[in-house]
Image (cartoon, grey):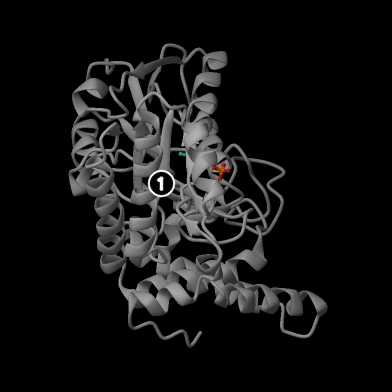
Amino acid sequence: MGVETRSWEEVRRHFPITEEAVYLDAAAVGPMPDFLRDSHLRAFEERLGRRAPGEFLESRERARGALARYMAVAPDDIVYLGNTTDAINTVAGSIAWKPGDEVVVHDQDFPSNLIPWIRLRERGVVVRAAQSEHGRLSIEAVERELSERTRLVALSHVFYHSGFRMDLAELGRRLHQRNIYLSVDGIQALGLARPDLEHVDFYMGAIYKGLCGPFGLSILYVDPRAADTLVPEHVGYASLDSDGIPWEGSMPYRTGSQRFQAASVNYPALHALADMMEFLEALTFERVTERILDLSGAAMDGLGRVAGVDIVTPPDRDRRLGIAAFRVGDLPSDVVAAELAGQGIRVAARAGNVRASFHIYNNDEDVARLVGAVADLARGRMA
Ligand SMILES: Cc1ncc(COP(=O)(O)O)c(C=O)c1O
């Protein structure tokens, strides 16, 4: 792709949004870097017929390879779907539930990671909600909801409202000792930090947040040990091991995770995904994570010193990522977000919190602008 990146300022220059706003809302939608214009143009030209159609497939494998290195899994364990919600439904719909089976969710999770699980009560599944406190969920709170009948725990890697990051390695280790699946909605971490999937069975996320890509494409990782025990809810020409139509006998599902790849996906978006993954990889995934943690940490430090501001996100670097969530006294979060937007600072209001979310295109000046504007608001509030 030819994108050379040496310093964070050079990285920043690839993101045109930085010239217009202090953009602190990648947790909602990640803004595209300029080089994705080429990725999209290339996709368009291919559809005009000027390029070989096979190039989509080349990008599909290029992206899969980079994702596999990012997640430390085999490329074949990853399939492409439409969005995060599709992927959650794919998992929920493909397990052979028995009446009385139990699923544990997180009471404050994003609706897409609750509704597909709650719906399983139509199949006799009992859904229990682990209770979070102040936007944080302890492993013990999850364990309190487990029983002999629990088959799966579903939660988000990073909580969209508080920025809390779950310890997937430890939770997964404890769940696997009890033969319980762990399904993780990773959309709030994808592209920002490499997940530890050793004890995670399902991990999914769309590419329009941390991967700054277009809508309409998501990834689903399925642990191959789990995959072979599942019957895919959606099937098509790509899910079977034989080219023929299985008029008789059992269904020849592909072995492993590829049985969940039923058909075509948003191929044009694969160019963007492959290009973005390689861009992040060239920076090294670890440096990307450290940079994001430094920025969100600096914001939390600065905001924490402002009288009247309460920080919601935990300070520990292992328990947070790009989000710095806070409250300004009893000011409604949407009022704070609107005030900041008026000054060109784009944050979100979520579940009563103001959510500033950082990415590699942000810098110390963005942090200072946020802290300064919030300090002015808080002062005005107290005056
Ligand atoms: C934690 C979480 N899960 C799922 C979604 C929805 O993702 P999608 O539109 O890809 O289904 C969001 C969107 O904000 C989210 O924050």
Q: Which residue is mark 1?
A: 356
Give the answer, above or below, for where 22 lies relative to 175: below
For the point 59% across and 37% down, the residue is: 233
User: Which quadrant: the C terminus?
Assistant: top left
Give the answer, above or below, for where 56 lies relative to 111: below
Asked if residue 85 lies left or right of residue 75, the reply is right
Q: Of 14 and 155, which appears nearest the observer?
A: 14
Number of numbered discs overlaid on the protein picture = 1
Most extreme residue toward the front is 383
Establish whether ligand 1 lies closer than 8 Å to the Cβ of label 1. no
The answer to whether residue 189 is seen in the rendering is no
Residue 381 placed where, x, y %? Answer: 39, 30
For the point 24% across and 31% down, the residue is: 175
* Secondary structure state at the residue bearing disc 1: strand
Residue 292 placed where, x, y %? Answer: 31, 59
For label 1, count other residues whose C-alpha is less than 10 Å away and answer few (under 14), some (14-19) or many (20+).
Answer: many
The answer to whether residue 89 is seen in the rendering is yes
Q: Of 187 and 151, which appears nearest the observer?
A: 187
Residue 318 placed where, x, y %? Answer: 20, 47
Rendering quarter of residue 86: top right
For the point 82% across and 78% down, the residue is: 48
Q: Of 23 and 46, which appears nearest the observer?
A: 23
Give the answer, above or below, for where 170 lies relative to 6: above
Residue 114 placed where, x, y %? Answer: 48, 26
For the point 25% across and 48% down, the residue is: 302
Amino acid residing under circle 1 = Ala
Rendering quarter of residue 199: top left
